[in-house]
Image (tube, helix red, strand yellow):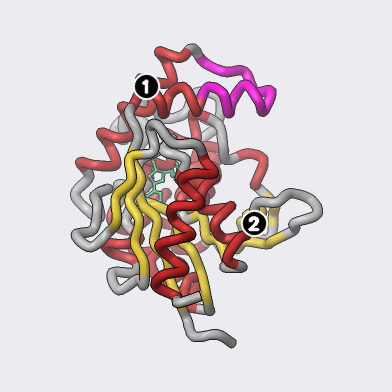
């Protein structure tokens, strides 16, 4: 097995992080670990249990749903989460919670916001740390998330931090939702949701979203996906001496 090599990709929602990571992993033959999907899985299980999949947590506070934080911690500590790669079915990973494939349920706006909320709970983050490290340590891998370069793999071989203007991010998210055939909220609503998520992810007390000091930053606003992936590939190959 080649020696372990970890690439950390962090940044806010809608910067093209997931699509770029997916393509880069394919080009380099690395394992792709979408850590946001783990927080989404916890949010999905919690919202489903509370019968809130339609409305999400947006208008709720923990006081209005008694014990919600404690339950999120229990779910994070006891649920077996794993990815499975089925390229023929779908080029991206499938995610299983206690052996049930929940991939098609975790991309709604309610789950996005719910994931951001549960990710601010310190015990939930703690429960997912070793799982992420195990997934990344097994060989050559790319992990994408919010705290990969700062907390999960502070010694990653290459770290990227992707950004983009909020209007461009909202535009991309709207296009993505429309392409998937989902009922898309308005552009203004998407912008509001992204801003709310940024605010939560950047201001939480534990492992907030921030650029690691040694991460290479790229503002993707004016670049195509291919340009971003080409640029990242060049940096990685230089490090790997490929
Ligand atoms: O990357 P994403 O949009 O699928 O992530 C969903 C939420 O999960 C995000 O708003 C914050 C949280 N998250 C996190 O806190 N840490 C990570 N490493 C990945 C995601």
Q: Position of residue 3 (x, y in %)?
A: 49, 85
- Provide the residue designation for mark 2: 96
Q: Which residues are magenta?
A: 174-185
Q: Earlier in the sequence, mark 2 or mark 1?
A: 2
| Residue 5 quadrant | bottom left
Q: Residue at x 54, y 44 (%)?
A: 226
Crowdedness near tag 1: few (<14), some (14–19) or many (≥20) residues, C-alpha within 10 Å: some
User: Is residue 184 highlighted in magenta?
Assistant: yes
- Provide the residue designation for mark 1: 167
Q: Nearer the viewer, residue 3 or 185?
A: 3
Q: Nearer the viewer, residue 73 or 96?
A: 96
Is residue 160 among the parts visible in the rendering? yes
Disc 1: residue Cβ within 8 A of ligand 1's nearest atom? no
Q: Secondary structure at mark 2?
A: strand
Q: Secondary structure at mark 1?
A: helix
Q: Position of residue 74 (x, y in %)?
A: 43, 57
Q: Nearer the viewer, residue 178 or 216?
A: 216
Assign the N terminus to one quadrant of the image.
Answer: bottom right
Q: Residue furthest right?
A: 88
Crowdedness near tag 2: few (<14), some (14–19) or many (≥20) residues, C-alpha within 10 Å: some
For residue 217, above or below residue 221: below
For residue 146, above or below residue 80: above
């Amino acid at each position: 097995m080649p020696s372990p090599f970890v690439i950390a990709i962090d940044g806010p929602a809608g910067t093209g992080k997931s699509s770029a990571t997916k393509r880069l992993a394919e080009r380099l033959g690395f394992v792709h670990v979408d850590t946001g999907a783990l927080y989404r899985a916890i949010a999905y299980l919690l919202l489903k249990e509370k019968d809130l999949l339609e409305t999400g947590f947006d208008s709720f506070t923990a006081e209005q749903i008694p014990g919600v934080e404690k339950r999120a911690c229990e779910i994070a500590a006891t649920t077996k989460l794993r990815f499975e790669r089925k390229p023929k079915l779908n080029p991206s990973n499938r995610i299983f919670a206690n052996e049930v494939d929940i991939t098609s349920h975790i991309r709604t706006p309610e789950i996005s916001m719910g994931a951001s909320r549960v990710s601010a709970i310190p015990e939930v983050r703690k429960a997912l740390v070793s799982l992420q490290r195990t997934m990344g340590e097994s060989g050559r891998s790319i992990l994408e998330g919010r705290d990969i370069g700062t907390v999960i793999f502070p010694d990653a071989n290459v770290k990227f931090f992707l950004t983009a203007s909020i209007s461009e991010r909202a535009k991309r998210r709207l296009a993505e939702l429309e392409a998937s055939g989902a009922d898309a909220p308005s552009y203004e609503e998407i912008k509001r949701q992204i801003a709310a998520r940024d605010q939560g992810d950047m201001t939480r007390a534990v492992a907030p979203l921030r650029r690691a000091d040694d991460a290479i930053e790229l503002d993707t606003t004016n670049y195509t996906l291919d340009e971003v992936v080409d640029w990242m590939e060049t940096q990685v190959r230089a490090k790997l001496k490929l």
